[in-house]
Each structure stands twice: as structure tokens, then as C-alpha cells.
Amino acid sequence: MSLSDFRDAPWGKSHVAYGKGALAMTPAPEYATSEVVLSSLYRVIGFPGSSERSVPPQGTKLQGLIRKAREKASAPTIGALGADAFDTLLSSVLESPKRSNQSAKRFLQVTPLVPQLALFSGSPRLAGNPWTPGVLVRRMVWLGSRDQAAAEATWRGLFDALTVHEDDDIFARFVQSEVEAWLPDPSWTFAPAPPEAIPSCPDVGSGAFPARQFVQDLDSVIASKDLLTRRQWTSLLEAILRLGTVAHVIWLCELHARVWACLSQALGGDGPKSVDDARLCMFPERFSFLPLSNKPLPGIRDSISRYLTARLGINATLWALEEAGTKPADLLGSAEGLLEACGQVRSFCTSSRTSDIREIVEELTDRETRTLLCRKGIGSNINEFVTYSLQQRQTANPRLRGYDQGYLLRKRGTHANSPWIVSLGPVATIALVHCSLSGVAGPRSVHRLAQHLSQYGVSMDHRDIPQNELGHQLRMLGLVLDSPDAESGMLLVPPFRVASRGYGE
């Protein structure tokens, strides 16, 4: 592929140096909810032979088995439950409500309570070649860990926590055994990360880094498992997964925009001259995209648009370097790689070639407006992932509208066109208070919670918490005490008392 080929099909194939970087956006996000992410994580970490594409056929197979067992009055009982009772378990007790635009579709969708349920439920798409959200979580574990050994320990610890043990509650053990009786293969087995899929741990300095906070919070949630029912624990895990994965994707969008800004400077003969300069240019010093009690979606679309523009510019530059006879550096792997790439641009891109790159980027920006505005293609896919992950689920059955309590965005009013605002659901609030207090001794004020949320891009003034919606939520859940001396403000109350297991340390 050449620069002219890229000009003709800019989204078809990226330069190899663009996709191999540790901070490349891979896998490319598409539609997902928190339950889809958790179901995919089950498959990635414990079902090596299963894929997203195999999920809908497995659901069809299970429905066929239930139907045949019903039709044959003398059929032997497969599990402890008969066919009718097992169908009721899946369709009523474990039902995960469909969205309003899914009401006419017939497929199994259940709460991902135990691993075996992920074999037939929770695929991002019912047809085609869906993406794998669990791979995104795995990359985040490696990117956010201190080193390779810590990442492997966290990944193994997560598998152990997701496994249904003898000390899990009786309902979780019952569900796992029933589904295993109907669908015995594949079996639940630990799947270590393949070497070719492991990104290096980048040196991002001291700036906000969602994946780093996500790994720490993952350890905190794992440590709380023994104190909760399985359903309570998976709800906390889903809340951290939905905030962590979205924050990581938007952080990558901002990082790509900053990388393209560096390359643009290099095309003009300027740009970073040292590793420290490159690190300051590459990594956001302050990351914010979720303003509490305000509308975040326009700003999110702007971030995605900047990422797509940067993707066009970075790839055009890399193909130009390739045509100039030099192997492009790994500019999305580290600050050192970006510094080297900027040096290559200054050395090998002549004034005419620089003009060609800028001309191509401007032409593609004009031509690909709908994609850049998140109305189709990659931009629309990323926007769908972010919004459906953060928003409270709008259910087809109005009686189940309170099902989702781990949301980060809710509608301001009851009208269909009411705007979405940043507002933490009860489960998300409990999960984040627990994680913010993990590993500390003694009381902490709500300032600590605000600092913790800022690592994920949630912005607020902690002094407003006593009067705002978050403060009301904290009081309703019994998670704060007002300081008696009025000097420390509202003090956080730990929702659970946990002794950290130390995964990843």
C-alpha cells in the first residue's frame, strides 16, 4: 500500500507502525454495554475456544435443546430442573431486559452472573464479525500494571475471582451447575494472555492515566468478593468495567490528537527535541471528559472527531516516511518512539512531501466529514460504545426500567428528548467509594472521592458535593458522615471492610 492508496481508502488499512503501538486503539470499539463487556471478559479469560461470533449459535442451540426436551414427555432430566423450569430460570429469573429497539428480536439475553452463561449470551452483535470487548480489558490490565509480572498476577487473580468456587453463594453455584448440564462444552479454563497480544507498559509519567487507576480498582473489587453475594459483586465489577473502559478509550482519543499535533510541528521543522519534551507533548497532564451534573456527549464527540482527524494525519505521515525509504518509528509505543518519529519527519520529509501530506489530510478531512462527525463508520462505532456503556439502559419493558443501577449518565427528565447528564447510579457510587478508600487507614473526606473520580476524567469541585446530587446520593446510601467539628466536611464511610489480597503487587 502506498500514500496514494491510503488517500483512496483512508479507513481500510492503517500503516503497520500505527497499529502495533502499545497505545494504539485496538481492538476498535463498537457497541457494548457493561454486561456485554463482562460476558466477553468471561470468554477471553476462561473459554479459550469460544468467540463472540459463536455466542448467538450457542443460544439457538440451547433453545433447541429446551424445545426438544419439552416435546418429549419421557425425555430424561438434563439438570436438576426440568425443561420448563430451566426455561423460566433463563427467561425470567436471570433475564436481562432488552432495549426498546430490540423488543422484536428473539434471542437469549441473561445477566452474566456466572461464567457458563457467557457461552450463549452477551455478544456485541447477533450476526457478522463482532469485536471482542474482553481483549480491551486485557490490554488495559497490561497497560495499567507496573510490569509484566504484576499484569500476569492481576489477570490470574481476576480469573480466580470470576470462577465459581465452593464458597460462592448457593444460587451462583446452582446456576453454574445447571447451565453446565445443558452446555458442558467448552469448560471453564484459565487462558493466559498470548505473547503477541501483550502490549508493553508505557512510561506515562505522573499524569492521569485511566488504565493505571482501573487496575488498582480491579484489585479492590476482587478483594471485596467474599463479603458480597455473587450478584452484588458482579454489579460492582460491571460499574468499574464500564467507567474504566470508556475512560481509557477517550484518553486514547486525546493522546492520538496530541501525537498528531507533535507530528504537525515536526512537519513544520519544529517539535519535541528531548524525551521529556515528547512525554509532555504526548500524555495529557489533566484528563477530563465527564463534567458532573452536566451534558458530556458533545464534548465526547469532539474528542472522537479529534482522534479520527489525528488517525488520518498520523497514517498519512507514516506512509510518506515509508515512501521516503525509512522505516517509521513506533510513535504510539512510548515518548522515545514519538521523539524518533518526529526526528524522522524532520530529516526525510522534504518541503514538497510535507505539502503533499498536509494537502492529503485536508482533502480527507473535507471528504470524510460524516465519519468525523460520528455519523457513520469508525466514528459512529466509538460513539455507540461510549454512550451505551455509560448511559442507564432504556428498557423495552417499562417495569424493568430500574434494572440498571451502575450507570454514569442518566436522563435529566422523563421526556424522550431529555439530555443525558453525568450522574452516578447507586451501584457505581458504592463501587467508587469502596475503591477510593481501599488501602487507606482512618477517615477520609469526599475530596478523596473527587480525586479518585478525576483519574477517570470525571470533573467536579469537591466543595460542591455536600449540596449537589452526588452528596445527596452519598447520604441516601449511608456512605458519608458530616464532620462534627465542621472542619473536615463530609467524611466517607467504607461500604465494606476488606483486607486487600494484593493482586498485582
Image: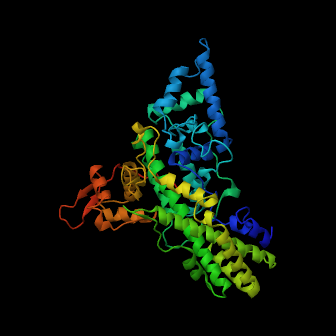
What residue is drawn where x is 56% and y is 39%? 115
Query: Is residue 103 positioned above or below 241 on the image?
Result: above
- In the rendered image, residue 468, in percent from the top left (x then y), is placed at 29, 60
Q: Nearer the viewer, residue 285 or 297?
A: 297
Picture quadrant of residue 68 = top right
What residue is drawn where x is 50% and y is 40%? 98
The furthest residue to the top: 74
What is the quadrant of the N terminus in the image?
bottom right
Picture quadrant of residue 142 = bottom right
Query: Is residue 501 positioned above or below 348 on the image?
Result: above
- In the rendered image, residue 150, in percent from the top left (x then y), is placed at 56, 58
Q: How many marks?
A: 0
For this view, does 404 lie left or right of residue 202?
Answer: left
Q: Nearer the viewer, residue 160 or 464?
A: 464
- In the rendered image, residue 40, in percent from the top left (x then y), is placed at 59, 46
For this view, does 502 lie left or right of residue 486?
Answer: right
For this view, does 466 lie left or right of residue 343?
Answer: left
Query: Is residue 332 positioned above or below 477 on the image?
Result: below
